[in-house]
Amino acid sequence: MQTDNEKYNETVQPNTAFLNELKAKLPEFFTKEGSFDLDKFKNQLKDKNINELSEGYQLDFIGKDYARRQAGEMPSTVIVPDEKQNQGEGKNSKNLFFTGDNLEVLRHLQNNYQNKIDVIYIDPPYNTGSDGFVYPDSFEYSDDKLKDMFGLDDDQVERLKSIQGKSSHSAWLTFMYPRLVLAKRVLSPDGVIFISIDDNEQANLTMLMNEIFGDINLVANIHCQLSTTQGMKVRAAKQGNIVKNAEYILCYTKNGRKNVAKHPIYDFRPEYDEHYSLYKKDDGTICHLSDVYDYHYPKDLNTKEPLGLGEAYEKSDDFKNFVRSHLANIVRSDKIGNIFDTESLSNGKWKKVEHNNRTYFLTVDSKGKMKQLLLLKDSWGTADDFYKNEGLRKIRGNWWPDFYIDMGNVSKEGGVKFNNGKKPVRLIYQLIKMVSNKNDIILDFFAGSATTADAVMRLNATDNGNRKFIMIQLPVKTYHENKDGKRIPTKGGVEAFKEGYKSIDEISRKRIEISAGTIVKNKGLSLPKDFDGSFKHYRVVKPVKQTLEDIEDFDLNNTNLFTDMVDGFSSKSLGIEGNATGEDTILTTWLAKDGYPFDADVQDINFGNYTAHKVEDNRLYLINEGWGSNQTKELLNQLGTHQLEIQSVVLFGYSFNVAELRELENGLKQLDSKVTLIKRY
């Protein structure tokens, strides 16, 4: 037989996801049979004086209808809890890490996280030809089925199948489309999504986002210069090439809100041009930002003598200019300096400077140049006081991401070196800080090395926030096996393989662990009491072939059960780590399906020697085999005497024969209080 989700997926059409969303928002335009009343809709548009035939344009690509259909399908996977992590280090954590295909995970999250995610940041494959992206879908449908689903002819079927295993623009768009549709669905009404991209797919991604989110929801196309290497620019100029040292971050909202910043973004250049590489000084001269960062220590404005720390800097005698130009490295929070304790200032790295009755702490490099500047709150007051006193402006809108405390680029994670391609944690930190509140949920479904999780934890540690992160990462292997069965590291996985990591998601989780440990060590007693530096871990996988065959052969009318179907969903049977029983997996998957959070209050209820699971005085789950007449009588007795208050009983159909089902179903129907029986396969 087929599972419930398989039966549903057979009915899915390219417009199913759209119609479901439309029905939720405009139910008055649907008939009792579930059909959309187009004539009624057109009449309503005419009543509102709207021309539904106005000109427009849209993005078309090979595989678009297939991608639209994927956005409407239900998951074909199960959620397997990592009981070792979840009952250990992650037991009390509200953060989540999913190992698996992000499309499948997003399908699961449609139920328990719909309209609940506040901020999404993703760094998807750029489809550059060198990043390893190929379209992963194997099109597990016959040609006849594809023709029937999409109304295609033979040539069109071949064109659709041509993107399989390819990295064309159509393949990339087909890959991204359903994921972005589902991302929009989980985003809250006031939510914001950021997507990193480069030149190769930036234009296509903008059109795709305009179609899914609407161009009215485009907030900004943020330009990010990720490299200022002068040598690279010189070499490129000599070769007659244009330097490509920038990427983009597309920012969209869900409700047309243009002003997304919940916290002001400060820009410290008194005047600047729209090209972020130039800086206009007070004397009207123009210099590059790299020059601005080269100031040495200032001279005292009265004596013209150095302030006791290093040589006088060369490019300005104005102390305000000096402070202003180095403000990028001031440690900022609600109160300036309050994230540094006395101990950290007395470790010898910070040099104290008194000037005009104000206190500065500086760090220097080996050449005597300033690296970091810290102002104490007792000498400056609030951050806003400082900006006001120094005549600096608050601005909203586009901003330069390097203008923030330098948290450092990630060059090594979990013992694995990364020479390039890692997003600066300060960049994502600033994005999240700009648009989030302290209790928001942050999602990254291309987690990579978990930089987003790192940024969330750092921000929480800085502003006493309680943000939660959800990371999703495909378990891309760091090796392949040759004909002899020997494991050979992949081209990009040599370092990881040497360190013992079998897949990228293992590095991601290790990164979170190391980063959390570093934050706890550095913050010490000033760390928020409820700081969450861990996560619950789940693996999203397809059932193994044997389990699928058992499902296929299952007969509803059998009076006896010959196979323990539940055990087929244990982590051991699925061939993965985690120590989860089949009952754990099924219950976790169903809780998500029924809209419960992953930390829902689940109580065990015993009926003789059978253990059921009650959730929030709402549902009772019966999963394992062993239910019989005695259990049915006890359940009916507790319901009838109001010892047990529930609205529905949900059972795993493969664990019940036809006689047990009928007895339970008939008994529930005789109760005065209505209790619904839900059978799942």
Image (cartoon, rainbow, N blue to C red):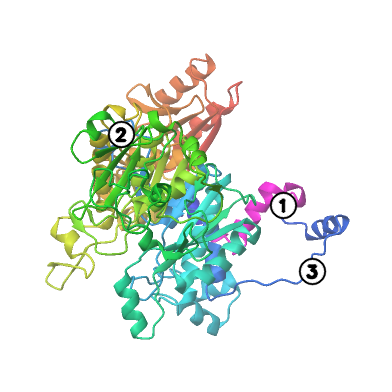
SS class, disc 1: loop
The answer to the question of whether label 2 and label 3 lie on touching residues, with beta carbons closer than 8 A, is no
Q: Residues within 10 Å of mark 2 (few under 14, many from 20)?
A: some
Is residue 39 at all visible to an observer of this figure? Answer: yes
The vertical placement of 539 against 679, above or below, is: below
Q: Tell me which label, 3 or 1, sits earlier in the chain.
A: 1
- Say which quarter of the image contains residue 51: bottom right
Amino acid identity at mark 3: Leu
Residue drawn 34% across and 55% down? 424
Q: Which mark is residue 340?
A: 2
- Say which quarter of the image contains residue 358: top left
The vertical placement of 485 against 506, above or below, is: below
Is residue 595 at all visible to an observer of this figure? Answer: no
Instruction: Please state if 125 lies on the left or on the right of 185 as rendered.
Output: left
Q: Which mark is residue 33?
A: 1
Q: Tell me which label, 2 or 3, sits earlier in the chain.
A: 3
Residue 168 or residue 25, whichever sits in front: 168
The location of residue 259, given as percent across then percent down, is 61, 48
Magenta part mainly helix, strand or loop? helix
The vertical placement of 375 against 502, above or below, is: above
Amino acid identity at mark 1: Glu
Give the magenta part as a residue range: 10-32
Q: Tell me which label, 1 or 2, sits earlier in the chain.
A: 1
The location of residue 151, given as percent across then percent down, is 61, 74
Residue 95 or residue 597, whichever sits in front: 95
The location of residue 325, given as percent across then percent down, is 40, 52
Which residue in the protein does label 3 denote? 53
Residue drawn 55% across and 70% down? 64
